[in-house]
Image (cartoon, rainbow, N blue to C red):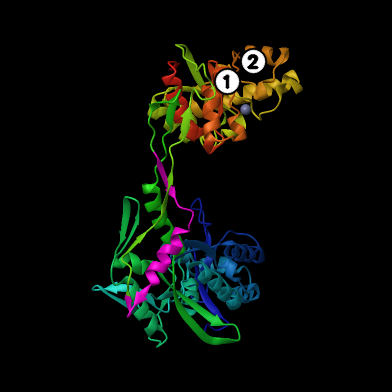
Amino acid sequence: MLGAAVQVVVLGINSYKNNNITLGVRLNDHILGKVTNQDSREQTDSIINTYENTTIPIAVEGTNYTGRITLRQLGEKADKQKVYAALLDIGHSGNPFEQLMDQNASLFGGRNISLDHTGFNNALAQQYITTLNEKVGTKPVDARFALNNQVVGIYPDAKGLTVDADAAIRKILGANPEDGSLVILPVKLTPAAITSPLLQPLLYQARNIAEEPLTVTASTSKITLSQEDLINLIVLNVVSDPDNKSKLTIRISFDELKLNSIVNDVVQQAAIAPESTIVNGGQIIKQGKDGLKPAETRPITEVLSGLLKRQNGQRTVDTIDIPMALVPSPVIELAANNPTSRTGTGMIRLTFDDGPGTYTEQVLDVLKKYNVHATFYVIGRNIGGHASTLQRIRNEGHTLGNHSLTHSDLTRLSRAGILHELSTTQTLVQQASGVAPTSFRPPYGAQNQAVREVAASLGLSVDLWSVDPLDWSQPGTNAIVQRVLSHDNAGSVVLLHVLHRQTVDALPSIIEGIRTQGYTLE
Ligand code: ZN
């Protein structure tokens, strides 16, 4: 440990400007600094102040961490009394600086200062290093399962990292900011301590789990986990007995997050969205297809139990099949409820309100698949963070419309309030997508003279709807499809929302049904 008095070399008192240095002062065979021709005590104070205010930056580096400290933060401080004494000692009488100038002109322009001082605060420095260790240090790992030459073992190669406090303080005190002010603090590697006999049964267990690859299947999709994948899933859990801290229990568990994401990948690949079957007057116009979705069981539990099942020390399961459930093709009966099923030749337009929202992108995917163009009435305050969605709407040939800033009933607002709702949304849509809307849909369809006049003043036409399947109330996918396609709800502008899954699921049948009826979609 360092003694109480530490000699610190401080460099770079930055006062050698303008080449007009007249004096240098030396202390303990070092140049204390330059001063100008002023009162000596004042000059001394100025040197000390300069020194004290010199925040020597020390960059520290550790794993994933770079920080800066200064000696001042560690308690570095000049001992003024010592400096005064030394100066007086040198000077004897008269002006010590003038005397020095006479004695040794070659000192002029020197830049080093060295002070004996007692201000360095070791406790503070230790505290700093402790904090630093919390940031950069890593704990040694008792043991880690790994594969080495295809053999599952417990290997002591995971070492902990600690900043070596004593060495670090010595380095900080010796820091020379002119070296580039970067101090790499020394770290100690703490070797992993294993070889505990406790680990032997775990090793045995780990070998069982990882010896053979494991295949996870769901319907036609599959993922095979190699020996190495399996090892990476194994986690050692060290539990200490609360009554006896020195008593440790180590057991094997699994990284459920990793396992979950593997299982999810398999299931997502296997999932199939159902396609609707469209029936008109008992005749199948379009045969749909059944879909597949994950069964209600928790698939990860299946995998975990499969990994642990064994007989005579061997894992007995090499394939785990995640159950999938059939989603029957929804049947849309065009004529069942509508004996005079609608047929026609007109144009029907789909509109999607209240976005950008959770399902905007999925709606866009369906529209793209069927090559249908729609109008999206967006709410200004929902736009933040969704600029790319608005750009996609525009790039894929759809129209962006104004659906107010806050989805308020505009008939209850003043003209200024209406203007704010509409014009702010114009700006937000323009900023996000590069184009300003030319049509406006009042929230709840609520409009009056003032609303229409303000909209017109912004060049916005008011666009309402003629078909409202109330999809926002989540009446069920089939009900949404039926309502859009039913005769008694015939019309040319369909109001839909981007708020719920059901709307997305109904969309393919809506589009196919409208086309089957003979109408054209924009
Ligand atoms: Zn709305």
Specify whether residue 412 is in view: yes
The x and y percentages for residue 123 are 60, 77
Q: Amino acid at mark 1?
A: Val
SS for callout 2: helix
**Depicted 367 relative to depicted 167: above or below:** above
Q: Quadrant location of residue 419?
A: top right
* Quarter of the picture holding the C terminus: top left
Could you tell me the amino acid type at mark 2?
A: Ala
Work out whether residue 416 or residue 112 is closer to the camera in this orientation and state it: 416
Nearest to the eye among marks 1 and 2: give it: 1
Q: Residue at x 53, y 27 (%)?
A: 482
Numbered mark located on residue 520 in the image: none
Q: Nearer the viewer, residue 224 or 434?
A: 224
Which sits in the foreground, 121 or 512?
512
Quadrant of the displayed image that contains ligand 1: top right
Q: Residue 480 at x, y = what percent?
A: 55, 30
- In depth, the one of 190 and 278 nearer the eye is 278
Can you tell which quarter of the image residue 452 is in?
Answer: top right
Tell me the magenta residue range. 290-314
Q: Is residue 141 magenta?
A: no
Q: Residue tagged by mark 2?
A: 455
- Residue pointed to by mark 1: 467
Q: Secondary structure at mark 1?
A: loop
- Verify whether residue 308 appears in magenta: yes
Q: Is mark 1 within 8 Å of ligand 1?
A: no
